[in-house]
Amino acid sequence: MSWFDIITTHSPALIVAVPLLTAFLTPLVSKINNTVRNLFVLIMLGITGLLIVILGNDVLTNGIRVYVFGGGAPLPSGMTIPVRIMFEIDSMTIFMVIITIILAIIGILYSWSFMKEEDGQDKYYTLILLLVTSILGMELTGDLFNFFVFLEISCITSCALIAFYVNKKEALDAAFKYIVISSIGALFILFSIGLLYAQYDALNMAAIAKSIQFSFFDRIVLVLLIAGLAMKSGLAPMHMWLPDAYSRAPASVTFVLVGATLASLYGGLRVIFTIYGKQLLTLVKQIGDIEINLNILLGAIIIALSVLSIFIGVFLALKRSDFTKMIAYVAVAEIGYMFLAIGAAISTFYINPDTGAMQLTTSGEMALKGGLFHILNDALDIGLLFLVAGAVYFATKQTSLNKLGGLARNMKYTTIFFLIGLLAVSGMPPMNGFASKLMIYQSIYQISPILSIIAILCSIMLLAVFVKVFQSVFLGPELPSLKNVKEVPKSMLVAMALVACIIVFIGLFPNIIIDNLVTPAANALQNTTNYISTIVGGA
Amino acid sequence: MIDTLLKSLTTGSGFWNPLVWGLAIGIALLLIYMIRGFGKKDYKINTEQTKAFLSGNPEYSKDEMHVKGSNLYWGFTQALKSIYNVLEKMHNGNTSDYVLWFVIILGVLFIVIGVI
């Protein structure tokens, strides 16, 4: 066995272990000096990224990977029920961990200058690395209790990072709200995991999916898991923690925090597609001759909540006069777009009369791909806007749109990056947001034209929101109070440039991502039978 | 690889090719540049000709000239005041109310999924 094979074999564990160990080594390395610490953190995250590439290549070539902690793969001999902690990695997992590591690396690079003047940097880096570890763990694990543990780690580290500016009461207030809401959500998730364990003697997602009957308790579990994870994902009307948390945390934290929110969305997808995937066509209600299956009900609920998210996000963003809070509300709307596509896709499940297999319609499949593609695009677009807002705050110490103006004169590069982010979030061609939103609009139009029209109109309003920001922050005469404002340091510019380049690249060549990452991820989500049979056998 | 780069994104009922779009935008910009060429070339920079004309009123100071963020879309938000009142009431900053929304959604889901 070559060293490369050994690394490939153990890459799932290493992807979590490297940032975890780095987190605890960081305070020690800080004793040398700050530059060494910053380089150390970046290099270690780079190594994690490399491990993800190695694992991704393996999974996309050879199929699902199962990594059993403390035992030979796939299971210790003679055991039929997977009792050990297992990481189960398919194309969907790879898609999510790639997004996470991109956010983490760029977030750390941005932090170099952004956090330079702050106290407690060693604690900051430790916490942000623990947050990255927890997000990666949530995405890699195939065990529900393990998922809960990583979710809790993410809650605690996120709360500490949101409250980083301890001298600001708004930051403490946002962190308090976040920990209360997150803990309640996590509590319900834990309760539902307990119910599943009581019924099926298993915590492994594939094992539960194989045995699930959609009993009375399973219905309760479904409701609790969906509500808990939807709240953690920021779906309206359970999104209220999000604008506070996103806008009060340091910009570099918010950038990584977007990944934590998306990891909860990923958890929701796993619950619906993997655990309850085989039960989606179960008859839930019968009104006269009309039979309503679970997928129709779930799809309708998700669509209703996502339309509400889009409305609330866009309408409130339009009225805000605080730069970061405005972007935070736009983030709520963007989450709505993702859920809209996913909800529409779920509602189109049917049994193919030729094959007898459960599958999505063509438009449903396109909606799912559009929704997944938008997860990546949203992380980058919203992330870039938060980095720009952070840069504006760094240079001016202001976030109020009423006190800003004419910054394009002194902050040329930041203005260009904002323009790229603006066009991308608003779904303007040729940016990446356009490609994913086009997929969402056109597929949803086949399912319900009115939903597509609402989505397009709200996207136009998003453009109006950012035209307002662009006009009031970057255009207009040079304000006397901002005359001495200078462009932000290079590490922040490089971080923003990296995100902007990825956005433009994906916008110009969307098929590279769709063919190599999005389509395999969508196929992996749909193919529950393959997931179950690979992990526990005989689905 | 080149094929993938140049491939159009098909959405089932349409397609999108950014390179074709780029070409179209390039042609449009060329046309705009040509039309711009027909404009007057005899104006004098830094004279009265290039100053903002405010109906004969004196120009305000830089601070006062800038349209602030909260001034924009004032008409829109004013017209939809009733909607904004409801939305802002929802976002009152009270954590108990935020939790209440979670409980409401739980209740709705319990009814819809058929638990209750």
Image (tube, coloured by chain):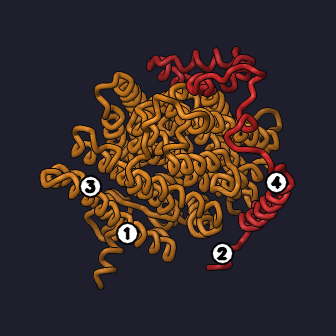
Chain colours: A orange, B red
Whichever of labels 2 and 4 marks the residue nearer the N terminus, that label is 2
In the image, residue B21 sits, relative to residue A389, either above or below, namely: below
Q: Chain of mark 1?
A: A
How busy is the neighbourhood of tag 3: few (under 14 within 10 Å), some, or many (20 plus)?
A: many
Query: What's the amino acid at mark 3?
Result: Asn
User: Which of pointers 3 and 1 indicates the residue nearer the eye?
Assistant: 3
Q: CA distance from mark 2 to mark 4?
A: 38 Å
Q: Tell me which corner region of the image, top left, top right, bottom left or bottom right, holds residue B58.
A: top right
Query: What's the amino acid at mark 2?
Result: Thr
Circle 4 is placed at which residue position? B36
Q: Residue at x 21, y 58 (%)?
A: A36
Circle 2 is placed at which residue position? B4
Which part of the image, by quadrant, shows the N terminus of chain A?
bottom left
Q: CA distance from mark 4 to mark 1?
A: 51 Å
Q: CA distance from mark 3 to mark 1?
A: 18 Å
The numbered mark at residue A331 is none
How busy is the neighbourhood of tag 1: few (under 14 within 10 Å), some, or many (20 plus)?
A: some
Q: Is residue A536 left or right of residue A456?
A: left
Dot 3 lies on which element?
A: helix
- How far across and down, in percent of the image, does residue A370 sit? 66, 54
In the image, residue A466 sits, relative to residue A517, either above or below, namely: above
The numbered mark at residue A38 is 3
Dot 1 lies on which element?
A: helix
Circle 1 is placed at which residue position? A50
Task: Please determine if labels 3 and 1 lie on a single subunit.
Answer: yes
- How far across and down, in percent of the image, does residue A508 sit? 65, 64
Query: Do the residues under discs 3 and 1 have CB atoms within 8 angstroms?
Result: no
Q: CA distance from mark 2 to mark 3?
A: 37 Å
- How far across and down, in percent of the image, does residue A345 sit? 68, 50
Dot 2 lies on which element?
A: helix
